Amino acid sequence: MTDEKIAANEMINWIITLKDDPKMIGTIGYYHIKPEHYRAEIGYMLLPNFQGRGYVTEAIAEVVKYGFKRMKLHSIEAVVDPINLLPTLLQQK
């Protein structure tokens, strides 16, 4: 199913690695690409032991830049799971 969506330009994925280690630590990409509306949804997954270190923040910056400059998107959407905010909120208390 993923291969068909990529072939139909409905999604694109990249592997997240460390700069000094090519081991995969996660994925990031665009899903539900709607080229006719110049929009897409961004999503990512990261292995738990690499979370909270800024890797996704860095990857999102590059993927968003790619989306606006190379794919000519006008809007990028993301669905945020509220559970992902919990560690940040607990650290602030």
Image (spheres, grey):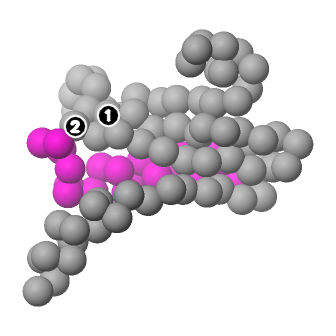
**Can you give x and y, in whole percent of width and height, for residue 18 in the image?**
26, 36
Indicate whether 71 appears above or below 64. above
Badge 1 local density, few (<14 within 10 Å), some, or many (20+)? some
Q: Which residue is mark 2?
A: 47
- Is-magenta flag for residue 50? yes
> Which of the 4 image quarters holds residue 85?
bottom left
Residue at 61%, 48% in the rendered image: 41
Position of residue 87 relative to residue 10, above or below, is below
Residue type at tag 1? Gly
Residue pictured at 21% horizontal, 28% vertical: 21
Residue 39, image x, y percentages = 74, 50
Is 84 displayed left or right of 9 in the figure? Answer: left
Q: Which residues are magenta?
A: 48-70
Secondary structure, mark 1, is strand
Q: Amino acid at mark 2?
A: Leu
- Decide which of 20, 88 is in the foreground and name it: 88
